[in-house]
Image (cartoon, helix red, strand yellow):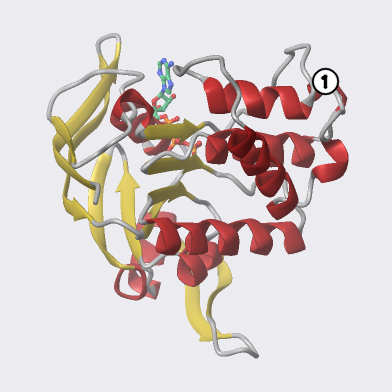
Amino acid sequence: MVSLVLKDVGASYGRTTVLSRVAIDILAPGTTTAIIGPNAAGKSTLFKRISGLISGPGVVQLSDATRGDRSICYMPQDTGSNAVLTVYESLLLAAKQGGSWRVEDHELFEIDAILEALRIEDLAFRGLDALSGGQRQLVSLGQALVRKPEVLLMDEPTSALDLHRQIDVLEFVADLARRTGTIVLIALHDLNHALRYCTNTIVIANGEMVSSGTTADVITPAMLREIYRVEARIESCSRGRPMVIVDGAL
Ligand SMILES: Nc1ncnc2c1ncn2[C@@H]1O[C@H](COP(=O)(O)OP(=O)(O)OP(=O)(O)O)[C@@H](O)[C@H]1O
């Protein structure tokens, strides 16, 4: 199964270096990893570097991938689209990207299953230009899922979703990773999502990786103080799940 290693990965825009020396020993199949850190830390840049949208120093080593240049899929933060397509057409286009144009029955079934899993079947024949922000985000997630990537990079995938849909989507993605062996990385500002759905967490600040490990080890009051400059506690909710309570800014 696929695995991903990052060796001293960096990136620049023009002459400005915004990311340096990100090193991850091994991201195993089926794991869901949170990428956290303040605004402008370099999280999206790391995703662009891993997916090959930008180049830079270091090595992104993908082993045992079977889907060639379709192995890695990056779902960007900005999901706006002016394309004159329906939701269904956009998913079909995403599924066929880089492949033959012949449409097989099983591909249509897969699109139906994803529309159903994301609870957007009723939008199938709606134009992309007539969707709400949250609906656009769900369609963008659908477009990523139909490609069946082995590495899925999701940039703030729930930022436009209501509370119920946030839980739905993150549970679905974490479960998909476990079932299929997909390596999932999710850039998140909501640290409660990292605590609940991500086994591992990587912290990026000022373009550098400052820590990585199991989420419970990484998201601590000390880290929140140092990186986010907030006074915070980790407590349990009524269902026994960990959550961050922020008492205030430092
Ligand atoms: N296309 C670009 N050209 C020049 N600089 C850029 C470009 N894209 C991003 N940057 C800069 O790179 C740095 C890292 O940006 P990046 O988008 O990776 O941060 P981020 O951690 O994803 O932030 P956020 O949490 O705010 O989305 C920032 O200083 C940003 O201004």
Residue at the image point whose x is 42% and y is 42% from the top: 152
Q: Is residue 100 above or below residue 236?
A: above
**Which residue does the image show at 38% across and 51% down from the upper left?**
182
- Residue where numbered disc 1 is placed: 129
Q: Residue at x 61, y 85 (%)?
A: 237
* Quarter occupied by residue 83: top right
Amino acid type indicated by mark 1: Asp
Crowding near pointer 1: few (<14 within 10 Å), some, many (20+)? some
Q: Residue shown at 47%/70% (left/top)?
A: 195
The reply, left or right, for residue 146 in relation to residue 113 is: left
Horizontal and vertical percent position of residue 130:
87, 25
Residue 249 visible to an observer of this rendering: no
In the picture, measured across the screen, residue 212 lies left or right of residue 199, that is left
Task: Pick whichever, 104 or 125, lies toward us.
Answer: 104
151 or 116, nearer to the observer: 116
- Say which element carries label 1: helix
Query: Measured along the vertical axis of the image, is residue 61 above or below residue 82?
Result: below
Q: Nearer the viewer, residue 249 or 238?
A: 238
Viewer can see residue 39: yes
Query: Relative to 232, does residue 241 appear above or below in the rendering?
Result: below
Please give left or right for residue 63 compared with residue 101 in the image. Answer: left
Above or below: residue 95 compared with residue 195 = above
Q: Position of residue 247 (x, y in %)?
A: 58, 73
Residue 200: % across, % down: 33, 64
Give how far across and how far down residue 32 sits, in percent: 40, 58
